[in-house]
Image (spheres, coloured by chain):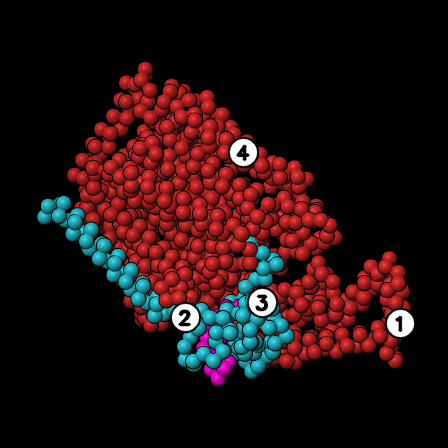
Chain colours: A cyan, B red
Amino acid sequence: MDPQRKRKIRLVVALSVAVLLAVALVYTSFSASTEAKEPSQLIGASPGTSYEMTGRVVKGSIRREGNGIAFRVVDRDGKGKSLPVTYEGTVPDPFRGGREIVLTGTVENGTFVGEPETLITKCPSKFTTKSDG
Amino acid sequence: MASLGSALLALAFLAAVTAGALALAGRGDERRLRISRRVVYAFCALLTACVAIIEIAFAGDDFSFSLVAEHSSIETPSGYKLAAMWSSQEGSLLLWAWVLSIAASAALYATRNKLRELVPWATAAMMGVAAFFTGLMLFAPDVNPFATTSPVPADGVGLTPLLQHPSMMIHPPMLYSGYVAFTVPFAFAIGALVTRRLDAEWIRATRRFALIAWAFLGFGLLLGARWSYTELGWGGYWAWDPVENAALMPWLLGTAFLHSIMVQEKRGILKVWNACLIVGTFSMALLGTFLVRSGVLQSIHAFGDNTVGPYVLGLIGVVLIGSTALIVSRLDDLRSPKRIDSLASREAVFLVNNLLLVGMTAVIFWGTFFPLISELFTGEKASLAAPWFDRYTTPLAILLVLFTGIGPLLAWRRISWESAKRVFRVPAAVAAAVAVALVLFTDAGDKPWALALFAFAAFALTGLAQEFWTGAAARRRLSGEPGAQALVGLVSRNRRRYGGYIVHVGIVVLLIGVAASSSFQTNRDVDLRPGESVVVDGRTITYVKPTVAVDEEKFTFGSLLRIEEDGEVVGYLRPSQRFFRPTGQETGTIGSFFAGEATSEVGLRPGAGSDLWIAERPNIAAVQRRVRAADQGFRACIQGAPGTPEQCKALRALMLAAQSNPSLQAGALEQITKLQGLAAERVARTYLTDTAPSTFKVIVDPLVTWMWIGALIALAGALIALWPARGRRRGALVRTEADARKEAKYREIRDAELDHAAGKLSDEDFAALDAELRREALEILDRENGGGAKAPANGNGPHPREPEKIEQS
């Protein structure tokens, strides 16, 4: 085969693979992603859907319950109605009242049930922490 | 001191601008270029002074600096005081600029006798970036590291205890050095594009900087992972968090760049690709800086301050648009008449590995920025979790390991079928044997991805071992040295090649650790009372007793755990959680002593086979109940309730007196704090008699130790590849471009000889290749010798010719 043509075929094959990967990427990312919500948007949300909730833990609301903990969260600006949350498993060190958290889970009977291992607690901004990577 | 610092910073900004302008104005003028270089050195000296002033302020607890007041305190351990600079945004910017000034000075010093056309533009590019970051500190709101507070507070806020970990002292500077050092190859690429000097000169001049950047960034990532593993109390080392991804992306692109520049050096192809890669790498490095500071993505690392984010985004825009325009306008010069000869060649495999690395970066980029992308298209912010990242990066990483194995076995240009059969036989057989053994004797068969990775890793490691073996054997034949000496000689005479192979060994070992620990991990949360045991993965863990420790700054609640294997005690672990007393604020109640930050101290029993990792959430509910009771008692006591002890009465009298006499207030406050502290300690110690169950997170991580070991091997390999060759150490930096070119050609000849001796090149191919390389080498020599009166090809003026220092093997 003449080299010019061979190169073209190679290019077409490579581009097709890249396009296929890109399509798979786009498709799976939209189906695998979880919607990000704030607590006030989740009050009365339909059960069964998985959400990524970002909110602020209400001070003094944390208590142990069974194998896990229960607490309440409000929107990040501290306003709006609070949402009850349950979470099983160990919590990150910085977790406490007043901190911002990100948690993935579902709403069941008006309570946000967190999936284990998905709780992220942000460091408090007063310690504008390191420039980490 | 602060005003001196501000003045020095302003001078540094002026120096950066001047150096860039002088370099551009001084193109072709040796004297002006020299001055501009010296101004860059001055820029470096000025920023060094700025950093020194800040560090002296931290060391001396000078709380008139806002930076010191907000990120340190008198009680902060002195080592962490020095590291506190980069826990802030303004300190990080200063660190960025300072490291850049060092890298720029080093690069200009190393190239002071060569690349005369290119250097002015490279200087301008580096100083442009430097002026940007220095200017940001001066002109953007709230990021001047020399801002002062008034009145001066008596004590600072302190450094968050989570960051008080040895690896946190060096993790940010390592990452920043990595990010920043990529500026050098980027700037020289810009210089090469502008001046259309697009052969491998700029690559030869900056290859070391790219490798240093890559090694620093990799080491920074490693330290971050280690910190996460031992300090964060969740037992993982990687979470696909946006900021982690932001550091991984330039590292992956940098890895691709380091490979593809070799192809350009050897074969003069992939020029457009390399230019695009370094622009991409540098943009990703800037993006890493931006992401930490912007708050646009939800991340454990994203904090409240977002004052410089938009500016950095602007710089990324300028870099991307400017570089793209430049590359497009130079496309004709970038085209090479040469092509990749054969798919069965080292350069073809390099290209495949480049595509895999870039593909991986694209996946991570998409996943990281998906919340923004999804908001754009659906109006909803949605994010992707670790399983999505794993789904794509796992197969890509496995293919990378396979090609890491194939690449070194092939020769440049082409490999004959006969030679291929010879070099692939042993590694392929070993890989097959390992796969069969794993399926038969372990449960690796249940995890096809992990199994594939282990088999390919066996292939790659055997291939690399074979490379060392045949290389040493060939050297023994050529030089007559005995075995071990031949191996050492082989590595030390071909540091780039064999240093690179050692990096490969390290990365493959690291990926084995990652695959094993992520696929075969046992992870359990258990509640235990003192005296109770649990069996996890064949190990019996017994909660012997609770422990308490109290010191100046923290309460530590923990446990003593006995570990037994096969009925024998193999050791004890002491996981705990530390509750730091809040600093820099008035204490109101005994309870407030427990209201500061908490950090986990993990109980870790590392092993070559697997790590046993235990974190504890001590159950301090009972302690807290008693604290509340004690607070009530204390209140009753100072209110003079009946039956109060003498101490209370005295304190009450003191407080009443303080109300009318302000000079007594400090003393009264101190008395209260002291009493409360004693009460808090007493209550804390009651934890020892508690029988409430604590929660333990127990993780058995197989082979995870090899991840750290692999990373260290890779780092050692990078150091070997960086180390200047013997005999040239002193002369290395004063070499001219002509020397560098000559030497590169000699190295190619040596490589071809080695490949031939190792059986990778057939006699026929070798004869042709050797003849071509020798002809090219002669051309270079001719040009130099014949051009005594003429200037050498790339210099603009006469420059001292170095004595021959090339060793030939």
Q: Which residue is mark 3?
A: A99
Discs 4, 2: same chain: no
Tell whether position A111 is magenta.
yes
Q: Which residue is mark 2?
A: A34
Amino acid on which disc 3 is placed = Arg
Q: Decide which of B151, B596 is in the foreground and name it.
A: B151
Q: Which residue is mark 4?
A: B14
Q: Which of the two marks, 1 or 4, is nearer to us in this view?
A: 4
Q: Decide which of B619, B188 is in the foreground and name it.
A: B188
Cα–Cα gap, marks 2 and 3: 22 Å
Q: Which of the two marks, 3 or 1, is nearer to us in this view?
A: 3
Q: Which residue is mark 1?
A: B649
Amino acid on which disc 1 is placed = Lys
Magenta region: A101-118
Residue B304: where, in percent of width, then height?
55, 58
Host chain of mark 3: A
Numbered disc 4: secondary structure: helix
- Asked if residue B161 lies left or right of residue B193, the reply is right
Packing grade of label 1 (10 A; few <14, some 14-19, many >=20) is some
Cα–Cα gap, marks 3 and 1: 39 Å
Cα–Cα gap, marks 2 and 1: 60 Å
Numbered disc 1: secondary structure: helix
Discs 1, 4: same chain: yes
Residue placed at 64% from the left, 80% from the top? Answer: B692
Host chain of mark 4: B
Packing grade of label 4 (10 A; few <14, some 14-19, many >=20) is some
Numbered disc 2: secondary structure: strand
